[in-house]
């Protein structure tokens, strides 16, 4: 089963994407500032996904087949600091 991380899983787009990912057979790690409804193959984590320290700790030792990032970035510097942490090389 493929595994995906969705940052902003309860936002305007994430709330619709997560159920579609489940239908397509994905295991979803969903991060948002509030808990979502209990769904099979979804693991919700309540956290601020814009907190770099939290996110980098969360990603440490993890592997995802895909990451969907619905966070809003004001300025490219903040995103450039983060996107390299999203790149996972094949094991």
Image (cartoon, grey):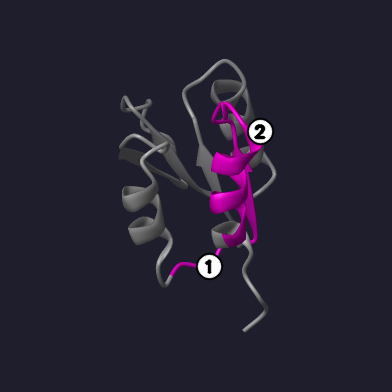
Query: Which residue in the protein does label 1 denote?
Result: 63
35 and 81: which is toward the camera: 81
Residue 48 picture quarter: top left
Instruction: Judge whether residue 73 is colored magenta.
Output: yes
Q: CA distance from mark 2 to mark 1?
A: 21 Å
Percent from the top left, x then y, of residue 20?
66, 33
Q: Which residues are magenta?
A: 62-84
Instruction: Judge whether residue 22 is colored magenta.
Output: no
Query: Which residue in the protein does label 2 denote?
Result: 20
Q: Is residue 79 above or below residue 4?
A: above
Going from the N terminus, do you reach mark 2 or mark 1 first? 2
Q: Secondary structure at mark 1?
A: loop
- Name the image quarter holding the C terminus: bottom right
Percent from the top left, x then y, of residue 61?
42, 72
53 and 11: which is toward the camera: 53
Mark whose residue sits in front, 2 or 1: 1
The residue positioned 40% from the left and 67% from the top of the image is: 60
Q: Secondary structure at mark 2?
A: helix
87 and 62: which is toward the camera: 87
78 and 54: which is toward the camera: 78
- Name the image quarter holding the N terminus: bottom right
């Amino acid at each position: 089963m493929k595994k995906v991380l969705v940052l902003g899983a309860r936002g305007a787009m994430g709330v619709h994407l997560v159920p579609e990912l489940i239908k397509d057979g994905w295991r979803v790690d969903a991060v948002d500032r509030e808990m979502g409804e209990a769904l099979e193959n979804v693991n919700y984590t309540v956290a601020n996904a814009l907190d770099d320290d939290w996110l980098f700790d969360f990603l440490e030792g993890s592997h995802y087949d895909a990451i969907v990032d619905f966070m809003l970035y004001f300025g490219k510097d903040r995103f450039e600091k983060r996107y390299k942490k999203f790149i996972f090389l094949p094991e």
